[in-house]
Amino acid sequence: MNKIKSVALAALFVIGFTAAQAQGQKSAYMSVEQMVYLMPEIPKIDTMLQRYQADSLNTAYVELIRDYQYRDSVLRDTSKMPPSVIRQHRQELEATGYQIQNWQQISQEALRNKQQELLNPVYVKVMDAVRTVAKENGYGFVYNQEALLVAPPADNLFPMVAKKLNVKLPTQAGGTAPAGTTPRPNAGAGTRPRAN
C-alpha cells in the first residue's frame, strides 16, 4: 500500500513539475501543409507526378489489357494444350482480370506512394525550418494548425518559417498577407498526401 502511495505521489510531482515548467514556455502554431504547398519544389513535383501517371501507370494499364487479351485468345483454342498449361493460363487470366477491375484503386495507391516519396524531402525541409525557428525564438511548443480545433493563445510561426526557407508569401489585394493568417494553396495545384 505504501508503494502505491509513493508511486502516486511521485507521479503527481512529475506531472505538477512538467505543468509548471510548460506554463513558462512560449507556444506557437504553424500550418505545415500550407508551407509545403508554397515550397518552390512543388510545381516540379506536380510535373513529375503527371509524368509518372502518364508514362508508368497508364502504360502499365495498357500492358494489363494486352496481357488479358492475349491470355483470353490463347484460351479460345485449348485443344492442343495440356491441362496444366490451360489451368495456369486461366489463373493468370483471372488475376489480370482482377487487376483490371480494381485498376483505379491500384493506380491511386501507386500514385499516393509516389507522392509521398517525392514530398517527403520537402516535409523534412519544412520541419527542420520549424524546429530551427522555434529554437531561435525560444518556443517550447509548436502546434500544427491543421491538427487543432482549440488551442491556447500562441504566435503564428508561418511568416518566420517562410523567411527561413526563403519562400515568398502570396500577397493579398494591395499588400502582404497579414501575420496572423496563412495563405491557401492554389486550387489547381493537384492533390498531395499528408505527411506520415
Image (spheres, grey):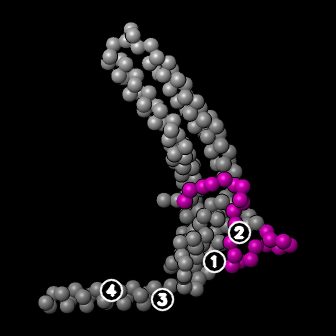
Q: Which numbered disc flags the more N-terminal residue, 3 or 4?
A: 4
Q: Quadrant of the N terminus?
A: bottom left
Q: Quarter-wise, where is residue 124 in the image? A: bottom right
Range of magenta residues: 171-194
Q: Which numbered disc flags the more N-terminal residue, 1 or 4?
A: 4
**Residue drawn at x 50%, y 26% as measured from the top left:** 68
Q: Identify residue type, mark 1.
A: Asn
Q: Which residue is mark 4?
A: 14
Q: Position of residue 84 (x, y in %)?
A: 32, 18
Which one is closest to the eye, mark 2 or mark 3? 2
Q: Which residue is mark 2?
A: 183
Q: Which residue is mark 1?
A: 156
Q: Identify residue type, mark 2.
A: Pro
Mark 4 neighbour class, 10 Å CA radius: few under 14, some 14 to 19, many 20 or more = few
Q: Which numbered disc flags the more N-terminal residue, 2 or 4?
A: 4
| Residue 89 left/right relative to 24 | left
Q: Which residue is mark 3?
A: 23
Q: Identify residue type, mark 4.
A: Val
Q: Position of residue 17 (x, y in %)?
A: 37, 88
